[in-house]
Amino acid sequence: MNKAILLYSGGIDSTYLLHELLAKTVGSGSRQRKNPVDEVACLSFNYGQPHVDKELGAAKRITDRLGVEHLFEKLDFPFLRQDMAGGDPVVPNRNMIFISVAGAIAKFRGSNMIFIGCTQSDYGVFPDCRPSFLRSADETLMGAVGVRLISPLVGMKKSDIVTDGRKKHGIDWAETWSCYSGDDEPCGECLACQERNACMD
Ligand SMILES: [Zn+2]
């Protein structure tokens, strides 16, 4: 029995991955294959991000609709709080911290897999989304708690995810949230907005 925890932000990539896990598929076209997940729970972090209410609100609405268990954890560290819209979108070592906390939660709950929705579109800006990082984090997590870190979207671009998500899973992307600003409406200018808008029709 494979029990998975998905690091879930309510954005495009992790929402696509959630649908893939629920549909028991991963990948598309000739690269599509079955995934071995029997049960999935989502895990979202409140780390003081300016857009926390929007992001986690979107995440919760989606998991409620899909009937998926959703865990929320608060990380109360001043160094994780930063202006990701007006300043640097990279919160240093954020994914390592998320993965590490998720590893402890997985062990506690008896989960044996953690999924993360890093994509090819993230490599340029986010060092902790690159395949070399993810491979070594998987090895570290296996060594520490016997839990696998799996990143099935590393070969995919965000634009493919948007197209596939609509076609394969009928995802309404308006349900998801990307903007880093903390405003009520997407600012249209931050990195998350720019990447999102570049993929939408
Ligand atoms: Zn924005």
Image (cartoon, rainbow, N blue to C red):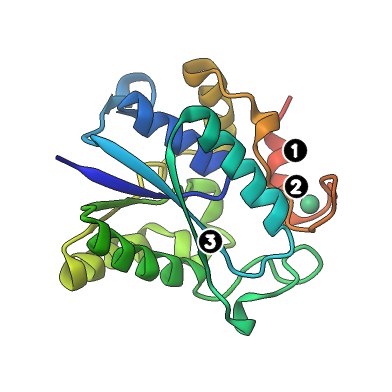
Whole-Å distance between the Cαs marked 2 and 1? 6 Å
Q: In the picture provided, is 128 more to the left or to the right than 193?
A: left
Query: From the viewer's perspective, is residue 105 above or below residue 82?
Result: above
> Residue 45 got which mark?
3
Q: What is the x, y in percent for residue 153?
A: 41, 42
**Residue lying farthest to the bottom in this orientation:** 78
Q: Tell me which numbered mark, 3 or 1, is placed earlier along the sequence.
A: 3
Which amino acid, by three-letter code, is at mark 2? Cys
- Front tag of 2 and 3: 3
Ligand 1 has an atom within 8 Å of the beta carbon of the residue at disc 2: yes
Q: Tell me which numbered mark, 2 or 3, is placed earlier along the sequence.
A: 3
- Front tag of 3 and 1: 3
Q: Secondary structure at mark 2?
A: helix
Which residue is disc 1 drawn over?
197
Q: What is the x, y in percent for residue 17?
A: 44, 37
Q: Residue at x 52, y 16 (%)?
A: 167
> Residue 193 got which mark?
2
Which amino acid, by three-letter code, is at mark 1? Asn
> Residue 33 got which mark?
none
Task: Tell me whether circle 2 and circle 1 mark residues in contact (CB < 8 Å).
Answer: yes
Ligand 1 has an atom within 8 Å of the beta carbon of the residue at disc 3: no
Q: Secondary structure at mark 3?
A: strand
Q: In the picture provided, is 176 more to the left or to the right than 96?
A: right
Whole-Å distance between the Cαs marked 2 and 3? 20 Å
Q: In the picture provided, is 96 more to the left or to the right than 192?
A: left
Residue 155 sits in quarter: top left
Q: Secondary structure at mark 1?
A: helix
Residue 12 sits in quarter: top right
| Residue 11 appears in view | no
